[in-house]
Image (cartoon, helix red, strand yellow):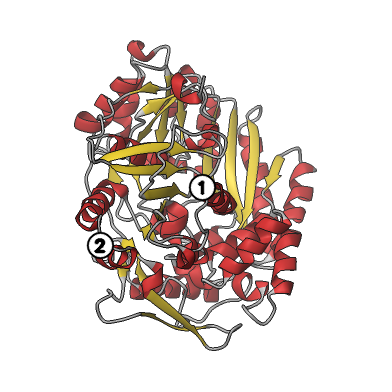
Amino acid sequence: MTPFTAERLLFTPTAPEPNAIPMVFAFPNTYSVGITSLGYQIVWATLALRSDVDVRRLFVDVSESLPSDVEILGFSLSWELDYGNVLTLLESLDIPIRSSDRSDRDPLIFGGGPVLTANPEPFADFFDLILLGDGEDLLPAFIDAYQDVRSASRTEKLRRLAEVPGIYIPSLYEVRYTSPDGAIAEILPIDRNVPPRVQKQTYRGNTLSASPVVTELAAWPDIYMVEVVRSCPELCRFCLASYLTLPFRAANLETSLIPSIEKGLRVTDRLGLLGASITQHPEFETLLDRLNRDEYENVRLSIASVRTNTVTPQLAEVLTKRDTKSITIAVESGSEKLRQIINKKLENDEIIQAAVNAKAGGLKSLKLYGMVGIPGEIEEDLAQTVEMMVQVKKAAPGLRLTLGCSTFVPKAHTPFQYFGVNPQAQKRLKRLQKELRSRGIDFRPESYNWSTIQALISRGDRRLSHLLELVRDYGDSIGSYKRAFKQLRGKLPSLEYYVNEDYEVDRVLPWHHLQGPLPSETLRKHLDEARKMMERG
């Protein structure tokens, strides 16, 4: 018996035709984790609905029966450190881990997902092609184009596929450096027939994603996920989830959202509403009224992070009735100055009121998300965060209050991509921990070391592929990264170069040849606005 037998499908896979493309679609983690990814589910279902594709699934702990003559092997990469499992799975299938070592006998290896769309360069040498952006239009275009070149040589296939908008072929671009361990000098296509820039593809429809499969073996058992919104209109200047996925889109309530919910609730009573800012759906109150009806009495509802000023007593009451005990709000800092710098349109009074409303509606706990090391931050800003948390606790006594806190990490395609990680961040996490816990407030810091690795991969270039191979062999720890940097000294820049340095705005960044939703000029304008606020103090 396999995990696949426990699945409840909300679609009917199409029987492959005799000459269908033998394909494997992998998730480089366990089945439980992978099947909980809505992105992975959607791509698999899209492929399974095509008669010209015979797709099988592969995870690190289980797989469907794999074809012996695979032509295409794809990976969905949602977490940076899963890259090691990509390499392990390739080796298990006797496929060279570097694209330059593969021959016509090997399948084409493609990757997609948020990690690769943001900055594919640290992993570029492991993939033959990378799909940049939303899969709704990009995936069908890729398969259709592949059908046209299916009998061609590997080199010809990649050349032709590079003509499809959003398909990035790393081997067709040369990266030149000022020195082996210096900055990037330029990134150029290898000849005039290769597009100089690859544009991330954006699906602009208002029918968004919903789970095609529900299973008790998912990390969130029996969850049916519905995408309420995509992107976020707030544009916090550090936020990859906002900038990389623009424009903000909301699922049509009557033609998409409600029918999707009704469909899922036929097979499960657990509903998850997804999106970076779901309460900013223009008809969210109408959706809330619908979910408050008696017919949804037995539904267990989970929601993603919500915007502070949308936490009303009505929202809290509906969530309480639908078996939700807690909500999560990203506040970033108790300093209003810092929130202005990052474009977080939020005041402390709104945060306090959200806590009061949450308690009034019957919720038991409130989790706030904060961040240290935000560009422009000083010690006084930490004191203001402590004071804000104390005020929230006083305003809503009895409400379990938690502050989860991370370290600022620069992300590609955002205005703050030029700022490095503040080396004082680790001390600031410890200061907040000491001061908040002494006041009886639960504080949960994320690992500073993990933030360092996130920043390394977020800002990394192709030279990191050799380092990542070494780290996989040494073991996943900060010590392994430092050991690998030491071994490769002189062949790539230092850890501090990638992680802690502030970059000039004219620096050639590793993703210079990959175009996100906004042009560089717009990102720089948003950066200038933030810097002006920093100067005001």
Please provide percent x and percent y for residue 446.
Answer: 66, 49
Mark 1 vs mark 2: give the one in front: 1
Quadrant occupied by the C terminus: bottom right
Please provide percent x and percent y for residue 25.
Answer: 41, 43
- Residue at the image position 40 percent from the left and 39 percent from the top: 67
Residue type at mark 2 is: Pro
Q: Secondary structure at mark 2?
A: loop
Q: Secondary structure at mark 1?
A: loop
Q: Nearer the viewer, residue 246 or 535?
A: 246
**Image disc number at residue 165:** 2
Please provide percent x and percent y for residue 464.
Answer: 58, 69
**Image disc number at residue 93:** 1
Q: Is residue 139 visible?
A: yes
Q: Nearer the viewer, residue 57 or 207?
A: 57
Residue type at mark 1 is: Leu
The residue positioned farthest toward the bottom in the image shown: 178
